[in-house]
Image (cartoon, rainbow, N blue to C red):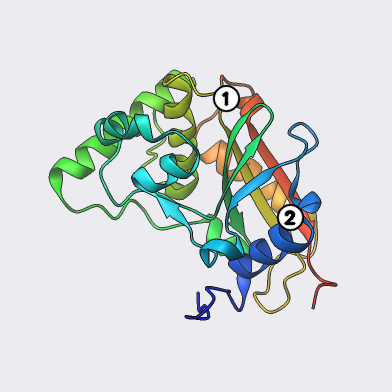
Amino acid sequence: MRTDPATGRAFRGSQKWLQHLVEHAPERLEPPKLGRLDWVSPIPATQYREYQDYAFLDILGLGHLDTALREFWPRGGAVWDGLAQSKSGPVLVEAKAHVSESFSSPCGATAPASLELIRKSLSDCSRDLGADMRSDWARCHYQTANRIAHLWWLHRQGIRAHLLFVHFVGDAEMKGPKSAETWIAVEMAANYALGLPKQHGLSDFIHYVHTDVSNIG
């Protein structure tokens, strides 16, 4: 996604909309169960920086978990579209503007040790959540799977974190969904493909927001 090298501002897609709403209308990104969010990324003060690995822990005040993260996931892990704090815990954010973003490529790790660690962590998470073990999380909806796995890992560390999927409606430039119903169907399909039961140990900590951007210039 193209961004302004001087300011970090994105020109299109989910990155653009998330930046705009965090800055100008953050209430449109807040799930009812979480309430007000205090955003630490993406914000103008850091040129809309997105964080990963130790940096995402540090900005959330969780830098002490760096060693534990290394044991769970290799470096070069998830890049978080947004990060925030809520009254009930830190919030990890994944934003999308069109459906094809949800059907991400399989895990791209090539180093045998990295791939082995990723597969083990995904398997541990899926098993603990009661998922159908025939689902291969390293291949099927991998981006969604690894975000859920990071949420699960934080809970294993005693951190009651939340995962927020922000799905934009009405992005004509990106040919995105015109209704929230389309996104809801995609979300249900992803959970089904991952073999997740309708209710599991993280159900109350995974949230979805469907935000219409069709009238935003």
Alpha-carbon neighbours of circle 1 within 10 Å: few (<14), some, or many (≥20)?
some
- Which quadrant of the rendered structure holds the C terminus? bottom right
Does dot 1 land on a helix, a strand or a loop? loop
**Viewer can see residue 49:** yes
Q: Is residue 121 left or right of residue 38?
A: left
N-term mark: 1 or 2: 2
Report which quarter residue 202 is drawn in.
top right
Q: Mark 1 points at which residue?
A: 202
Does dot 2 land on a helix, a strand or a loop? helix
Q: Mark 2 points at which residue?
A: 182
Report which quarter residue 25 is drawn in.
bottom right
12, above or below 92, in the image: below
**Viewer can see residue 146:** no
Report which quarter residue 90 is drawn in.
top right
Q: Closer to the camera: disc 1 or disc 2?
A: 1
Q: Which residue of the protein is positioned furthest toward the front in this rendering?
A: 45
**The disc labelled 1 sits on which kind of residue?**
Leu
116, above or below 12, in the image: above
The mark found on residue 11 in the picture is: none
214, above or below 42, in the image: below
Residue 66 or 194: which is nearer the viewer?
66
Q: Where is residue 126 in the image (x, y as percent from the top left)?
A: 43, 27
